[in-house]
Amino acid sequence: MRPVLYLCAVFLVCSCQKQGSSAVVFVQRGKDFPLDVITADALEEDVTVFWKFNKKDVLVRFLPGREPSVATAYKGRIEFPEKKYSLKLKDLQEADTGVYTAEATGTDASKIIAEYHVTVQGPVSPVNLTVDSVSNNSDSCNITVTCRAQDSHINSTFRCDTKNCSQEGGERSEVTASGAFLHVYLENDSIICNHSNQVSGIKDMKNTQDFCPRHNDPDKQYNSNSVDPGLAAFIGILILILILIISAILVIWHRKRGKYRTRNTECTINAASQANPVVQSPTVDAPGSSPTSTYCMVGQSMGSTQTRGKTQVQESLYAQVEKPARS
């Protein structure tokens, strides 16, 4: 039950008093409450008015021509406003819950001129709404929650599609051990857990769009073919890093290959640039002598292969590289 009940109770007090019947009211613990006699002006001047608690304990006596007399148990807790035969009860506690009546006696028989059924309640304890689970599929999103107060709790499930949300089984509520009401319901896009009694209320809420964003916003419906922007950026960065790594590997490989070719062709002489290449067989220097020439094989001879008899002799082409003689 929502806190608006307190306003209804106050309205009930006013309407009942105007009709001359009893009123049911709820007062928060520690607050003050006025006990008024609305029909006081219509009473005779010589009447005696008694305010009683549960129709037996006298709180106040209004005697003709005298000051009000307050019972010992209520001294310091009662004030007298300007209204005739009215009073104000201060600092009400749970023990003050009961029926308060104003009884007038005079030349006629006694009659009750005002009556209040007062219930004193303390403020409700804090409440907590927790989301237990969220399940998503292509058609809907289900949210299971727990609405918990100090001495009670309620579980409920909410189903959201692309247009709206609904509560399975409708709104749920129960009366707690302390006499308050625990209530869980859906209001617009919010799940509300409300703990209240007739004098106070406190609530906790969760927004369904925080858990089912694709289902609760028709203008931004989820597209299963779309790619998350963050994921797309991550993939792009990963591809760029891979390209850089492959490029670096290729550069290093080409450099090493170039050095290898350079080493193999240090002794190579472009035979095509020599008009008359010198063709010699490699010679072996005499022992103790210092070689003055070095021969490097540069490939097969570019000359023709001569046939001597039936035997083909293929000559090799050597280039002579002069080296300084040892001194």
Image (cartoon, helix red, strand yellow):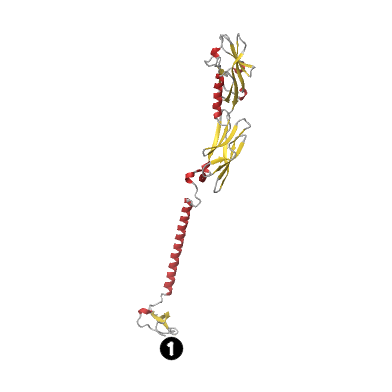
Q: Residue furthest left?
A: 275
Q: Is residue 65 above or below residue 127?
A: above
Using the image, determine if residue 177 lies above or below residue 315: above
- Quadrant (top left, top right, bottom left, bottom right) of the C terminus: bottom left
Q: Can residue 291 be seen in this snapshot?
A: no
Q: Dot 1 corresponds to which residue?
A: 307
Q: Looking at the picture, tell me which residue is in the foreground, 222 or 61.
A: 222
Identify which residue, 215 or 128, lies in the foreground: 215
CA neighbours of label 1 inside 10 A, class few (<14), some (14 to 19), many (20+): few
Q: Position of residue 238 (x, y in %)?
A: 47, 56
Q: Residue at x 55, y 21 (%)?
A: 15
| In the image: residue 251, left or right of residue 41 | left
Residue 183 shows in this picture: yes
Q: Amino acid at mark 1?
A: Thr
Callout 1: SS: strand
Whether 164 is drawn above or below 94: the answer is below
Q: Position of residue 316 (x, y in %)?
A: 43, 83
Choose top left, top right, bottom left or bottom right for residue 314: bottom left
Q: Residue at x 61, y 37 (%)?
A: 153
Corner quadrant of residue 28: top right
Looking at the figure, which quarter contains the N terminus? top right
Question: Observer-nearest residue: 292 or 255?
Answer: 255
